[in-house]
Amino acid sequence: MAKPILIAGRRAVEHSTGVFVGIDVAKARNAIAIADSTRCGEVRYLGEFDASEP
């Protein structure tokens, strides 16, 4: 039986990844970015999106 690499919430998981999502909210457009949870993690800017309903 293989040993679990990480125990999270009383269950064994092989790999866990965390991310942060940043949203700059404005009346007309919203800017969105995603950052890895590690100290020197990559930050990816996804761009600006219309805030109006389709």
Image (cartoon, rainbow, N blue to C red):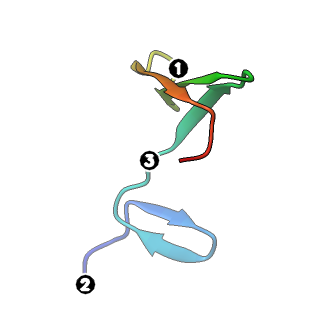
What residue did someone put label 2 on? Answer: 1
The reply to whether discs 1 and 2 touch (Cβ–Cβ < 8 Å) is no
Q: Which x, y percent locates residue 51? A: 62, 33
Q: Which x, y percent locates residue 36? A: 46, 30
Mark 3 vs 1, N-terminal side: 3
Label number found at residue 7: none
From the image, which quarter does the N terminus lie in?
A: bottom left
Mark 1 surroundings within 10 Å by alpha-carbon count, few (fewer than 14), some (14 through 19), many (20 or more): few
Residue type at mark 1: give it. Arg
Mark 1 vs 2, N-terminal side: 2
Q: Which x, y percent locates residue 29? A: 61, 22
Label number found at residue 39: 1
Inter-mark Cα distance, 2 to 3: 24 Å
Q: Is residue 52 above or below residue 45?
A: below
Q: Nearer the viewer, mark 1 or mark 2?
A: 1
Q: Residue furthest bottom?
A: 1
